[in-house]
Amino acid sequence: MTADEFRRTYALDYEAHSFTNSLVIHADCLEWMSRVPGESIHAIVTDPPYGVKEYEPAQLEKRANGNGGVWRIPPSFDGHKRSPLPRFTALSPRERETIRRYFREWAALALRVLHPGGHLFLASNVYLSQLVFSAVVEAGFEFRGQLIRLVRTLRGGDRPKNAEKEFPQVCTMPRGCYEPWGLFRKPPPSGMTVGECLRRFQTGGLRRKPDGRPFEDVIESERTSQKERQIANHPSLKPQSFLREIVYASLPLGEGIVLDPFMGSGSTIAAAEAIGYHAIGIERLEEYYRMSIDAIPALARVPGAPRQMELAFL
C-alpha cells in the first residue's frame, strides 16, 4: 500500500496528518472503527481514558483550575509539583457500570478492525483493571495475561482525607509500584495454528526481543521524563523507553499496522515512528490532536529504547 493509499483508506473524510510511516486522525474512535475496513489492523496499543469521564470538558476545566472534580490535585512532594491524577475511587456504581458497557462496546469494534490473531495491549490501573478486562473478554477477546510496568507512580499511600492528623498511621490505599496492562488476542479461526496465522495474517504471536529472548510480561520503567513532558503536556504520557518495547512486541513479524484509538498527544505513534512501524492514531479532542502533530516527531527523536533495541533499529 502506498502512502497515498494508506491515507485514503484510513483518513476517510476526517482531518488527518501524515508522518513518515504513520497517520493521525481527528475523530471519535468508536465512529472511526465502525467505518474503516474490517480486519485491516494488526495490533492495538492504547491507554484509554476509562469511559472518558475524566476528559469531559467540565472535568478538564476543573483540573486546569485546580478545583479537582474527578481529578485529584496532589500536594507538592519534596518541592516538586505532581501531576493531577484521576480519582477512580470517586466513581459511583452507576458510573462503573457505564465504564463496563463502554468498554464492551469499544472492544467489539476493536475485534472488528483487528486481523484474526491480532493482539490488544490495554493500559489500566489496579482499581479498574478487573472491571475493564472482564468487559473486553465479554466482547470476545481472549485474555492472554497481564503486562506489568514496574514504576513508582506516587499514586496511593495517602492518609485519610481531612483526618490526616487524627490517623497518621493509616493509608487509604497502598502506594502504587506497578501499572497493569491487559494483554488480549482476537481469536484465530477455529483450528488454525499460530504458524498458520502468522503466514496468513502476520499475527498470532508476539515479537521476540532483538537478541532472541522472548518478550517478558514484567518491564521495569521510569516515570516519564520532564524532557518528554515538555514536548507533550498530556496527563497520562508514557515514556518512550517503555512504549517502544511493547510496540516492538506487538507485531510478531515486524510487519503491519499498529493502532492507538485513544492517541492523546501521540506517544504510542511516536514509538512506532522511532522503530519504523506503520501506525494510526485517533484522537477526538482537538487540543491533543493539534499537540500530537508537533509532539510525535519530537518524541520519536528522544533517546529512550534499551541499548539492544537501539542497535536493532539502526
Image: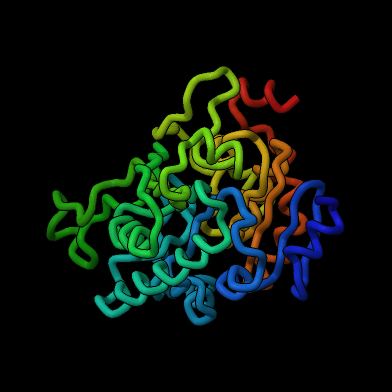
Residue 91 locus on image (x, y percent): 31, 73
Residue closer to the observer: 201 or 75: 201
- Would you say residue 38 is visible in this rendering? yes
61 on left or right of 274: left
User: Image point 47% across, 25% down: which residue?
Assistant: 214
Location of residue 299 with respect to 309 vertically, above or below: below
Count up the numbered dots.
0
Location of residue 300 with respect to 220 vertically, above or below: below
Residue closer to the observer: 135 or 92: 135
Instruction: Report which quarter residue 9 is drawn in.
Output: bottom right
Q: How is the image coloured?
A: rainbow
User: Image point 72% across, 53% down: which residue?
Assistant: 295
Residue 247 locus on image (x, y percent): 58, 41
Residue closer to the observer: 116 or 126: 116
289 on left or right of 127: right
Location of residue 226 with respect to 128 vertically, above or below: above
- Would you say residue 243 is visible in this rendering? no
Residue 270 locus on image (x, y percent): 68, 47
Location of residue 32 with respect to 237 vertically, above or below: below
Instruction: Report which quarter residue 78 is drawn in.
Output: top left
Residue closer to the observer: 89 or 52: 52
